[in-house]
Image (cartoon, rainbow, N blue to C red):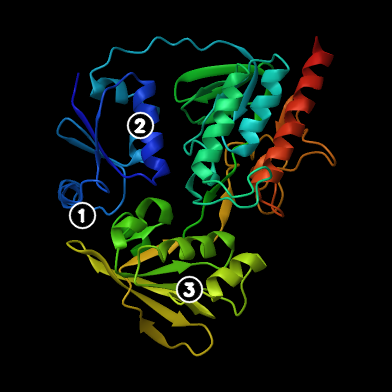
């Protein structure tokens, strides 16, 4: 079997997902913890061409990259060959219920559907565990008075779903046919069919859209402080945004960084009062009001070297001396697959029937952030996941 090396660190949800995917293939790998072996940090950066993000995965002499790159190989049906594994036997068959997405909505739907003896299949999507997987501390999920790490919370929800005979598979659906029943879902050239479908595909992190931002992704630009803050010890960094996620990222980064600039386009924050108080009282955080990112500076050898920002009132520009930028400006609902089939609103969120999770096609249900442009909380996502499972169970019973 081909030698596989995974460079990782403890507080890295994408490292966990990469290892889970490799384990699901039965592949053995060597894990090198750069937080426990500091000398391996520079080795990883050199082998990975200067990338400042974990995990970094190597299969033989091939530098795969991070979790997203590993997942892309699996989606392209190339991973087994690179790992030297025999082609997996396709055990997929028709299911009564398939759930797309593995965040709090998807896993809660799986728990309720599993308890109703529907034996649902959960197809994880590219971000197994959803947005909470990258949240360092969840303080407002009921039942955890001391708070809980987002990754641990999602692992518990997954374990609970599996306890009730839900099956969880790595994968991402690339096309759907909802014009006939059973519904047909395609993962490349692989076909899944089901009688009922719950969509809990959530939302994906939004970037600024700058060419320089794209050029330095993984080399100074990140959307996950939990994963990559470790690389900026003693340095100055910037967080872009003004909501709960941005303020949480800024607070977390003060554990490593000399200074954190919070770059916000407005003159007031959107985050909760508790989160605002924490940030405003942190001497390491400086808020740059009415300010936008103008350009990420750097070169191909060193990666990002500074950040130039612009005051939206005066037009004045300045460089911050920041060597890292963490983007936290909101999310876009993952509905691209469904626009030709299902009702969506002007912001591309799914539109269920009022007071229900039922979509305009019978047998299709929606829950979580893919349908919620207002609350977007883990607990509200979980609540609609419960609703979707109950709606699906009742609808399937009516078809019997």
Query: In percent of the image, x 47 and y 72: which residue is there?
Result: 262
| Residue ID for mark 1 | 50
Disc 3 element: strand
Local crowd size for mark 3, using a 10 Å CA cut-off: few (<14), some (14–19), many (≥20): many
Disc 2 element: helix
Q: In which quadrant of the rendered image does the N terminus lie?
A: top left
Estimate the spatial distance between the alpha carbons at disc 1 and disc 3, rounded to whole Å: 26 Å
Query: In percent of the image, x 33 and y 31: which residue is there?
Result: 73
Q: Are marks 1 and 3 in contact (CB under 8 Å)?
A: no
Q: Can residue 146 be seen in this view?
A: yes
Q: Position of residue 343 (x, y in %)?
A: 73, 41
| Residue ID for mark 3 | 263
Specify which label sits upstream in the sequence, 2 or 1: 2
Q: Do the residues labelled 2 and 3 touch (CB within 8 Å)?
A: no
* Residue 358 image-quadrant placement: top right
Estimate the spatial distance between the alpha carbons at disc 2 and disc 3, rounded to whole Å: 34 Å
- Determine whether, in the image, residue 219 is placed left or right of residue 312: left
Q: Nearer the viewer, residue 249 or 316?
A: 249
Residue 176 - label: none
Q: Nearer the viewer, mark 2 or mark 1?
A: 2
- Determine whether, in the image, residue 380 is placed left or right of residue 125: right
| Residue ID for mark 2 | 19
Q: Which of 79 and 377 is in front in this view?
A: 377
* Residue 342 image-quadrant placement: top right
Q: Which of 83 and 349 is in front in this view?
A: 83
Specify which label sits upstream in the sequence, 2 or 3: 2
């Amino acid at each position: 079997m081909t030698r596989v090396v995974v460079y990782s660190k403890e507080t890295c949800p994408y490292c966990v997902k990469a290892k889970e995917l490799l384990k699901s293939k039965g592949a053995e790998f060597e894990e090198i913890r750069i937080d426990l072996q500091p000398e391996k940090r520079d080795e990883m950066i050199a082998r990975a061409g200067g990338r400042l993000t974990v995990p970094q995965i190597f299969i033989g002499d091939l530098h795969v990259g991070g979790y997203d790159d590993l997942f892309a190989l699996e989606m392209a049906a190339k991973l087994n060959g690179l790992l030297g594994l025999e082609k997996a036997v396709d055990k997929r068959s028709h299911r009564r219920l398939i759930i797309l997405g593995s965040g709090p909505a998807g896993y809660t739907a799986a728990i309720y559907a599993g308890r109703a003896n529907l034996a649902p299949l959960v197809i994880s999507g590219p971000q197994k565990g959803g947005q909470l997987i990258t949240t360092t501390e969840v303080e407002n999920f009921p039942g955890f008075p001391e708070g809980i790490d987002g990754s641990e919370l999602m692992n518990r929800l997954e374990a609970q779903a599996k306890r009730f005979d839900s099956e969880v598979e790595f994968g991402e659906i690339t096309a759907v046919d909802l014009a006939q029943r059973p519904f047909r879902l395609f993962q490349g050239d692989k076909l899944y069919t089901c009688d009922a479908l719950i969509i809990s595909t959530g939302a994906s992190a939004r970037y600024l859209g700058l060419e320089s931002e794209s050029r330095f992704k993984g080399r100074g630009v990140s959307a996950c402080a939990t994963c990559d803050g470790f690389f900026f010890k003693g340095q100055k960094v910037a967080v872009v945004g003004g909501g709960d996620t941005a303020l949480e990222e800024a607070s977390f980064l003060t554990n490593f960084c000399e200074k954190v600039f919070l770059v916000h386009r407005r003159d007031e924050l959107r985050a909760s009062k508790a989160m605002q108080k924490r940030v405003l009282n942190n001497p390491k955080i400086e808020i740059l009001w009415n300010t936008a990112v103008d350009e990420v500076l750097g070169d191909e050898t060193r990666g990002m070297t500074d950040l130039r920002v612009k005051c939206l009132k005066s037009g004045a520009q300045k460089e911050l001396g920041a060597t890292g930028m963490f983007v936290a400006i909101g999310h876009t609902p993952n509905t691209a697959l469904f626009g030709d089939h299902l009702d969506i609103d002007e912001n591309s969120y799914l539109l269920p029937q009022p007071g229900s999770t039922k979509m305009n096609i019978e047998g299709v249900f929606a829950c979580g952030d893919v349908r919620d442009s207002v609350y977007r909380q883990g607990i509200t996502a979980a609540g609609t996941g419960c609703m979707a499972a109950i709606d699906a169970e009742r609808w399937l019973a009516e078809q019997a």
